[in-house]
Amino acid sequence: MANLFSPLTIRGVTLPNRLVVSPMCQYSSKDGFINDWHLVHLGSRAIGGAGLVFTEAVAVSPEGRISSGDLGLWDDKFIQGLSRITSFIKEHNSVPGIQLAHSGRKGSTTPPWHGIKKMGKNVGGWSVISPSSIPYRDYEPLPEEITLSEINRLVADFTFGAQRAVEAGFDVIEVHAAHGYLIHEFLSPLSNKRTDDYGGSFENRIRFLLQVVEEIRKVIPKHLPLFVRISATDYVTGGWSVEESVELARFLNNIGVDLIDCSSGGIIPGVHIQTFPGYQVSFAAAIKKTGILTGAVGLITDAHQAEEILNAGNADLIFMAREMLRNPYFPIIAAEQLNVHSSWPQQYERAKKK
Ligand SMILES: Cc1cc2nc3c(=O)[nH]c(=O)nc-3n(C[C@H](O)[C@H](O)[C@H](O)COP(=O)(O)O)c2cc1C
């Protein structure tokens, strides 16, 4: 049996295989609501055989959106629409996961097809917040520095988001602490210049993330897995490092996080990242040595490549983004390539090569 198609049970949830649809913003929502695009997009990937299908980054507050087209979960009114997606994914033997996010200083932008430009308030944009009043790009408006009472509200926003996600039927919750968004802005010394309990030392910079995780763990059922996506390195001297990621993983493991989804970069613009197939796998491998489960992501596009990552013990799950966009049926085809019985939806069985 190929490792890629062996089930994995985390707490009380069993993923039928190790292939995960990585969170991917679709910029296609109106006022935070799910619509047919999301159902077809996520539903197709469940039909395609992925073991775990993540939504895009779902904003826990309106100003936590990256663009005005992001999904939201800051109100109970979003639960019903999201339930439609989770039921569909479950009907097709996959597991629905949700990524909870706050964009921090990188919010209020236009979608990629309009150039990821800052949206002015006159065209529906909003003021952004960050641990320190430092913009992502020099020429952007200064973000407002988050006050201590706002920190409590933000922790509550994540917690309510998690509660609603459970009500909507999601079986895995991932906290987005990567890619230069709010939580990463607290972690990295490049964006966090605070002099209070939330800035300076490593213990202070990770405090906000630990509080978010602790509060989420209190409100979600014990049997549900909790993942955290991090940027394992900023690739910049003086920035967040792999060593800090490894140390963070130990803290997160102790407070009920089950898996670290290991991405990288995104805190400041203009950083050269040398990319190659599996370029972030070494981060998953280093973090896995602490004893926590890890997910590998980034330029993993081939069944044998994915299988080797698991066989080498470098990660427990394989997250795939762009290849899943190119081919929603990647998992079914990958199973055939690894000589594993592939479970085609019965409606599609006549397409199966004999
Ligand atoms: C269209 C698109 C949207 C993305 N949106 C998110 C997101 O919402 N949250 C996130 O953590 N990463 C996001 N990412 C990053 C992917 O999840 C993934 O980490 C990255 O694309 C590298 O994996 P890949 O080489 O398989 O594409 C996005 C990537 C793409 C291509």
Image (cartoon, rainbow, N blue to C red):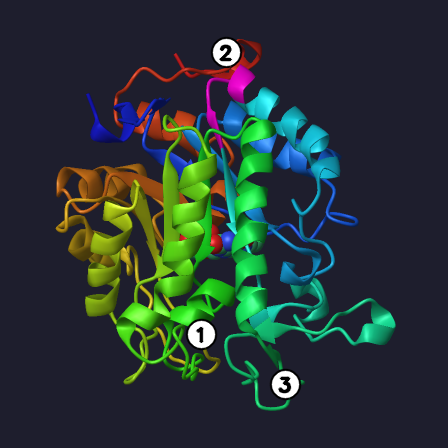
Q: Residues within 10 Å of mark 1 (few under 14, many from 20)?
A: many
In the picture, the disc for residue 142 is 3
Q: Secondary structure at mark 1?
A: loop
| Marks 1/2: CA–CA distance | 45 Å
Q: Amino acid at mark 2?
A: Glu
Mark 3 belongs to which amino acid? Leu
Give the camera-side residue of 85 and 21: 85
Image quadrant in which you'd find residue 200: bottom left
For marks 2 and 3, the one nearer the N-term is 3
The location of residue 267, given as percent across then percent down, is 44, 74
Quadrant holding the C terminus: top left
| Residue at screen point 40% across, 30% down | 224
Q: Which residue occupies the foreground of this view, 321 or 63?
A: 63
Residue 2 part of the magenta-drawn span: no
Q: Which residues are magenta?
A: 90-96
The location of residue 278, given as percent across then percent down, is 28, 55
